[in-house]
Amino acid sequence: MKPFRFVVLLVCFVLLTSCRWGEPDIDEFGNPINPVVANSSNRDLEEIKKEGVLRALIVYSSTSYFLYRGQPMGFEYELIKWLAEDLNLKLELIISEDLDTQFEVLNRGDVDIIAQGMTVTNQRKWEVDFTQYLYLTKQVLVQKKPDNYLKLSWKSLEKALIDDAIELINDTVSVRKNTSYYERIQSLSNEIGGNIYIDTLSSKLSDGEIMDLVAQGKIKYTIVDENVAKINASNLPILDIDVPISFSQRIAWVTRKKAKNLTKIVNEWILKNRKKKQYNVIYNKYFKNKYSYKKRERSDYYSLKNNQISKYDNLIKAYAQKLNWDWRLLAALIFQESHFDPKANSWAGAKGLMQVMPSTAEELKIKDLSDPRESIRGGTTYLKQMYNQFESITDSITRIKFAMAAYNCGLGHVMDAQRLAKENKLNPSEWESNVDKMLLALRFPANFRKPFIKYGYVRGTEPVNYVNEIFQRYEQYQQFIKLDEELK
């Protein structure tokens, strides 16, 4: 019996230790260690402030972030931009390419915050933290009315549609997998004691795109947050969104669990601003103003529908080739000058799309500054002249920045800033932190009265902001608008 007892004891020991090996690691307080959080980035507010950049992951959609008539817009975009400005941080936006990998991108430290309204759930809180809620909403069922719904009586229409979630038993609902919608269907199946089958959709589809699939009859049902459903359905009257699927839920942004200080300051900011008029104006613009939404949807210059920035794209492309520029960069400059308004006039007397001064127009033989072709021809000719003045600068992007600054405030002031850079042992051929700083310095008498300064005082903030804002907008245009060869 002794050998037998030894074998039994050995087997028990192996079983016990193997079970122990399968248990999660425990921290000093006896709590299980979450390996996802333990291995996540330690980047927090201190490092973000030291770098001066807030990196935000954002979704390209009809409510979060998009381009309309050359201008970036969106609920999340306006809020995160406001937050970054209040924190005195430069904002860097990264468009989410795959909704399934957002938490991974955040925890890896590639971004600091997910600026997308997500439903707060316990399952998600295992991996990430949520900020204070941005708004409350509930989930609704999206279903298509019959094609002839306008001819149907109210009772017939009512019979053709689901009016209670329990009717989904043994039917199929299409949603993205890693979403609160997916979780809700699973919970709903359990609550009503019947199977609801889930058809999983691509994680690259937005809520608006999925609602379009329902309207087209390609999928039967989906689930969307009510406020998003209402604004998208305003242009799709064939959709019914009246059946609630959940109670009210909190919608918030997402931060890393280790980024406690960032989460704290974002929470304070949300609590301070959530009841302000500005906050409500932004919310209403994207979730309640159906007229503006319909206007965007029908516009040729709405990036979710067309690959266009303005009605002058073809002209801009033609003249950008003569500059050897990406046409989207020239478009960003023209937006900065006139917001694509050919009748725009400045306080200084500049006119047209490219805000050419009358004296310059005379030199360039521009007869009508309000004519888009004439304005772009003249403006790009003048830009080329400015670009040619900086032949010693070998980096093309840096040289473009010098040309833009000269276009804005005059060649003489930029050359003065180069002279001042030399005196202060800065590089006169570098823009960032060199010549741009000297343009700012030329606002002060101690600098613009120096004997080698030929053109005197200049409002240096204007050309510096001008260049920065054009390149920021250019980055956004690159995100939204593809080059012709990229579309093939």
Image (cartoon, rainbow, N blue to C red):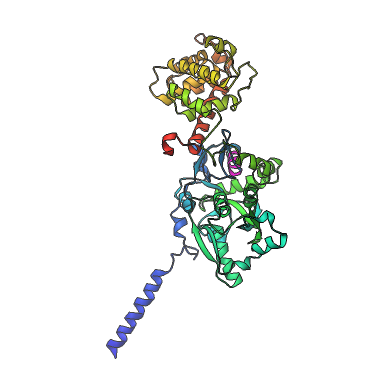
Q: Which residue lies furthest to the bottom in this view?
A: 1
Q: Is residue 123 left or right of residue 163?
A: left
Q: Residue at x 35, y 78 (%)?
A: 13
Q: Position of residue 470 (x, y in %)?
A: 52, 28
Q: Which residue is drawn at 56% across and 61% down?
A: 122
Query: Of residues 58 and 51, which is closer to you in this image?
Result: 58
The answer to whether any part of residue 441 appears in the image is: no
Q: Position of residue 289 (x, y in %)?
A: 68, 43
Q: In this view, does 109 lie to the left or right of 232?
A: left
Query: Of residues 330 and 235, which is closer to you in this image?
Result: 235
Q: Which residue is drawn at 41% across and 39% down?
A: 488
**Magenta highlight: main SS:** helix
Residue 257, compared with residue 382, is above or below; it is: below
Location of residue 448 (image quadrant): top right
Q: Position of residue 276 (x, y in %)?
A: 70, 43
Residue stretch in magenta:
75-82
Q: Is residue 93 left or right of residue 249?
A: left
The answer to whether any part of residue 230 appears in the image is: yes
Say whether residue 78 is magenta: yes
